[in-house]
Image (spheres, rainbow, N blue to C red):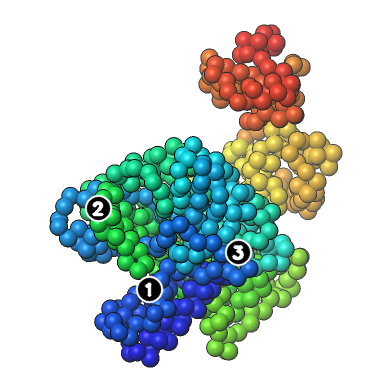
């Protein structure tokens, strides 16, 4: 990189940092930002006189929003030096530990959110300030007051700065984005941007709605007397701050690596987003000797996890037709490796999402893949457009059977029941695990059977013969027999599985079970009133079910006669004091609670898990806790296990 390129890159970094820190709307993935920052750092190290004083490598990242009152921290806030692998870990330790002492390390998860400094005076929360540039931040005290995990009062009376991360649960993040979409606002790209954006609101009513959490990770100004960070932190947790899981002590690089591997494995189990772990030298005297660079403590570093967000390019959109005829767009992207997997596709749900993202073919995009969730596009990098990106048009004809598509609000549907894609997908669904569980009848084989015109619908499966399959490529004796056996064995499945397998819109496994338990094979003859009388079946479900039966009754009867499904009708319970009553069970009983639950359900009771005004009885065992108190408060009748049994006899 020459000086001109360096200056250009610094300009870019500053622009990206502003977008990220000030507007909570990144213009790049973290990985791209970190890469560029490192390249610039290399230049700065090789050319100490040419470095730009405003380089993000030389300062703590944040900028302060003008609309807020500014406030100073009592002592400086810092960033963390990033490391990405074992080699960098070894280098960091070598730099920190010049004399080769035995270091003890204190390790904490690094939650990704917004940094916040809380000033407590005389045990009272006095001020809450965002990190800003490390010296001055935004005064967000009014918003901090709405965060339940920030105590307003603590028992420590000396002047104390408590530092932590304001984060948002992954589930709450999804909910906020759904809400923002409804209001026509752009969704946040990730939970970090969502927490930073929610903390920096002028109207604290908005912050209050966002369910922010505060996770303490350290302190600033203080007069506490501890010799180890781990002991200091235990004291801070004892003041009433939330203690995150996995705070660990260790001595060797190998142990640090073990903890790292464990934390990476568990990362998806955390309810909040983690982007690494922070390693701190535990001894506070050593910390003071090591001190700080311009930007971070020399006695700690952030060991980053593999990135789950990457930048790539949208190559194309393909259309998939599901079993119900819904046409779903799928993004085909330039292959990119994310956390060990090569990603080439991302879900898009529907055409509204394409419009909302303002996505065009050839756009550069940020894509996220975390855990087992299907990759998703979180952001279109519009400032990188060059002008020849192509619009994505809504289809009017089915990509498979070419019949005209029906546009139903945000859904686009192929209505042709014989559409090959629909047929294939409905057979795949019919054979799937939660339906008839026909082993060996997966996607590829169903496609082959339909394409080779061996079957046209579900019923044809049951008239397949050895000779039909013999001629197909890859079908040898064993495979043919296994498949035919699996199909034969699916006869006599439970009725509710057969009903579920039909894939009637809005009728899933739970609804199927309820309908089958009540009506058995008579379900083909029932009326609206019959259906709606089942608790849990609403108008939409009833209509969908009846419409399906109106059109497909003959087909269903034929299927029943071939399959001869197993019918289990639940007998109506005899009259008793618990019939049709809502019951809650709490505490330890003479038998397992599941047994008691089953017993009550056989009596016709609905067993619920929480006490409310609608609860008729609370049955309690030993050590009954808050549910018992709540029942008394709501004047719900409470019965011991013995009293319950006496009532029935
Ligand atoms: N995508 C972009 O355009 C863009 C732009 C700027 C910065 N960034 C990203 O932001 C990061 C740099 O930001 P940063 O300087 O705020 O650093 P950082 O967020 O990586 O790390 C420092 C912060 O970590 C937090 N933290 C969490 N747990 C902690 C713990 N246990 N102990 C101490 N601190 C803890 C603190 O708030 C601290 O301020 C980079 O990783 C970069 O990728 C991205
Ligand atoms: Zn079609």
Q: Is mark 2 within 8 Å of ligand 1?
A: no
What number is the disc on residue 485?
A: none
The front one of 94 and 296 is: 296
State the residue position of label 3.
69
The residue tagged 2 is: 286
Residue 567 in percent (x, y) is at 65, 33
Q: Position of residue 182 (x, y in %)?
A: 71, 62
Precedes in sequence: disc 3 or disc 2: 3
> Could you classify mark 1 by the number of other residues whose Cα lies within 10 Å: few (under 14), some (14-19), or many (20 or more)?
some
Closer to the chain start, of discs 2 and 1, is 1
Is disc 1 placed on a helix, strand or loop? helix
Disc 2 residue crowd, few under 14, some 14–19, many 20+, Cα 10 Å: some
Residue at image mark 1: 57
Q: Nearer the viewer, mark 3 or mark 2?
A: 3
The reply, left or right, for residue 526 in relation to residue 623 is right
Label 3: how many Cα within 10 Å (few below 14, some 14–19, many 20+) = few
Nearer mark to the viewer, of 2 and 1: 2
Q: Quadrant of ligand 1?
A: bottom left
Query: Gap between marks 2 and 1, in whole Å?
Result: 25 Å
Classify residue 45 as left or right of residue 68: left
């Amino acid at each position: 990189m020459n000086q001109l390129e360096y200056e250009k890159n610094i300009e870019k970094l500053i622009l990206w940092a502003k977008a990220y820190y000030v507007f909570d709307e990144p213009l790049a993935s973290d990985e791209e930002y970190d890469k560029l920052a490192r390249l610039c750092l290399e230049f700065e190290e090789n050319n100490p006189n040419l470095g730009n004083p405003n380089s993000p490598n030389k300062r703590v990242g944040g900028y302060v929003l003008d609309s807020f009152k500014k406030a100073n921290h009592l002592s400086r806030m810092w960033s963390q030096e990033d490391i990405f692998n074992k080699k960098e870990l070894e280098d960091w330790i070598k730099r920190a530990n010049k004399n080769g002492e035995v270091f003890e390390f204190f390790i904490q998860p690094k939650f990704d959110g917004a940094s916040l400094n809380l000033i407590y005076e005389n045990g009272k929360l006095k001020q809450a300030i965002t990190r800003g540039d490390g010296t001055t931040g935004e005064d967000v005290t009014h918003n901090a007051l709405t965060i339940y995990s920030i105590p307003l009062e603590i028992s420590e009376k000396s002047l104390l700065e408590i530092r932590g991360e304001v984060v948002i649960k992954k589930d709450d993040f999804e909910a906020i984005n759904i809400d923002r979409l409804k209001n026509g606002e752009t969704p946040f790209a990730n939970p970090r941007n969502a927490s930073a954006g929610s903390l920096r609101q002028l109207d604290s009513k908005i912050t209050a709605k966002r369910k922010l959490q505060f996770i303490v990770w350290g302190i600033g100004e203080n007069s506490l007397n501890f010799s180890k960070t781990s002991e200091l932190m235990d004291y801070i947790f004892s003041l009433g701050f939330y203690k995150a899981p996995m705070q660990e002590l260790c001595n060797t690089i190998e142990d640090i690596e073990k903890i790292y591997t464990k934390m990476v494995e568990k990362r998806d189990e955390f309810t909040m987003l983690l982007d690494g772990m922070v390693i701190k030298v535990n001894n506070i005297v050593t910390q003071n000797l090591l001190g700080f660079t311009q930007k971070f403590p020399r006695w700690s570093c952030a060991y980053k996890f593999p990135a789950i967000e990457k930048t790539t390019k949208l190559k194309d959109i393909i259309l998939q037709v599901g079993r119900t005829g819904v046409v779903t767009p799928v993004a085909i992207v330039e292959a990119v490796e994310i956390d060990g997997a090569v990603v080439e596709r991302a879900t898009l749900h529907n055409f509204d999402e394409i419009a909302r993202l303002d996505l065009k073919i050839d756009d550069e995009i940020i894509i996220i893949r975390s855990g087992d969730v299907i990759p998703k596009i979180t952001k279109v990098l519009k400032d990188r457009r060059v002008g020849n990106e192509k619009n994505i048009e809504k289809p009017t004809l089915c990509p498979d059977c070419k019949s005209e598509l029906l546009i139903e609000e945000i859904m686009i549907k192929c209505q042709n029941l014989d559409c090959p894609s629909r047929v294939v997908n409905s057979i795949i669904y019919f054979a799937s695990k939660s339906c008839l569980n026909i082993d060996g009848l997966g996607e590829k084989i169903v496609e082959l059977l339909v394409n080779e015109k061996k079957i046209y619908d579900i019923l044809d499966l049951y008239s397949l013969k050895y000779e039909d399959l013999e001629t197909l490529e890859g079908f040898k004796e064993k495979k043919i027999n296994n498949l035919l056996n699996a199909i034969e064995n699916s006869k006599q499945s439970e009725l509710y599985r057969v009903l579920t397998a039909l894939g009637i819109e809005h009728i899933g496994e739970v609804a199927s079970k309820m309908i089958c338990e009540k009506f058995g094979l008579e379900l083909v003859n029932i009326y609206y009133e019959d259906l709606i009388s089942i608790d849990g079946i609403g108008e939409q479900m009833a209509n969908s079910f009846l419409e399906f039966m109106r059109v497909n009754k003959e087909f269903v009867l034929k299927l029943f006669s071939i399959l001869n499904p197993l019918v289990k009708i639940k007998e109506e319970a005899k009259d008793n004091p618990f019939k049709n009553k809502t019951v809650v069970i709490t505490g330890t009983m003479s038998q397992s609670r599941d047994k008691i639950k089953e017993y009550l359900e056989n009596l016709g009771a609905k067993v619920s898990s929480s006490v409310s005004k609608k609860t008729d009885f609370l049955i309690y065992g030993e050590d009954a806790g808050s549910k018992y108190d709540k029942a008394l408060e709501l004047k719900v009748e409470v019965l011991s296990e013995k009293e319950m049994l006496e009532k029935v006899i």
